[in-house]
Amino acid sequence: MHKIFFITGVNGAGKSTIIPYLKLVLPEDSFVVYDFDARGVPPDADRKWRISETKYWISEGEKISEEKSTVICGFIKPSDLAEYNLINNESPEIVLVLLDAKPEIIKKRLINRYTKDGVFDKSQKVIGRPIDEFIKGNVLFAEQIKNEFKKSGFPIIDTSNLIPEEVANEVIKIISIKENK
């Protein structure tokens, strides 16, 4: 049985950016790569929505696990797996890989994503929160999620000084090692 890989991290860690590289390098006959947000993100996305989407993507991975491994780029925490009973005895192995970055890098990436010429549109909201609050929240949460990953033993990739192709190559190395176990 093949595995389900979640490439996770806070906003600005590089998840969506590496999808095209993963699709390009991972063989289509062995892997399918998804963007967690492909079905759309509601303006008030919350934990309930995230867990519902996680269940959906795990079920998609289970459907093809006899033939292919699934790679999903989107946010999930190690504690979600047990806390929400997301896996059962018949589920394929789920491997989480954290994309992490230094706080100042995450902040810079998100500012670049959500500003025009370095200026915020104060009326803009992301998942129901003002943009500056959203960015601060991601920067603060990055350290918490990294600590959870350290405790869980799942791999962590620091994307701070890597270009997207290098991040994708690091992810592929981990996938190759885990896939061959």
Image (cartoon, rainbow, N blue to C red):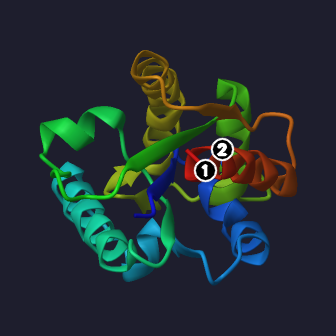
Mark 1 crowdedness (10 Å alpha carbons): few <14, some 14-19, many ≥20: few
Mark nearest the camera among 2 and 1 is 1
Specify the quadrant that holds the N terminus: bottom left
**Residue 175: x percent and y percent?**
63, 51
**Residue 82: x percent and y percent?**
18, 37
What's the residue at 80%, 58% (across, down)? 117
What's the residue at 47%, 43% (across, down)? 96
In the image, taking residue 156 as reference, residue 90 lies left or right, namely left
In the image, taking residue 162 as reference, residue 132 lies left or right, namely left
Specify the amino acid type for callout 1: Asn
**Residue 50: x percent and y percent?**
27, 57
- Is residue 36 visible to the viewer in this orientation of the structure? yes
The image's mark for residue 180 is 1
Specify the quadrant that holds the C terminus: top right
In the displayed structure, 149 sits above or below 37; it is above
Q: Secondary structure at mark 1?
A: loop
In which quadrant of the rendered view does residue 25 lie? bottom right
Marks 2 and 1 close (CB-CB < 8 Å): yes
In the displayed structure, 117 sits above or below 181; it is below
What's the residue at 54%, 42% (across, down)? 97
The image's mark for residue 177 is 2
Q: Please tell me which residue lies in front, 116 or 179.
A: 179
In the image, taking residue 112 as reference, residue 70 lies left or right, namely left
Mark 2 crowdedness (10 Å alpha carbons): few <14, some 14-19, many ≥20: few
Q: Secondary structure at mark 2?
A: helix
The image's mark for residue 16 is none
- Is residue 123 visible to the viewer in this orientation of the structure? no
In the displayed structure, 15 sits above or below 148; it is below
Q: Please tell me which residue lies in front, 11 or 36.
A: 36
Specify the amino acid type for callout 2: Ile
What's the residue at 71%, 70% (across, down)? 26
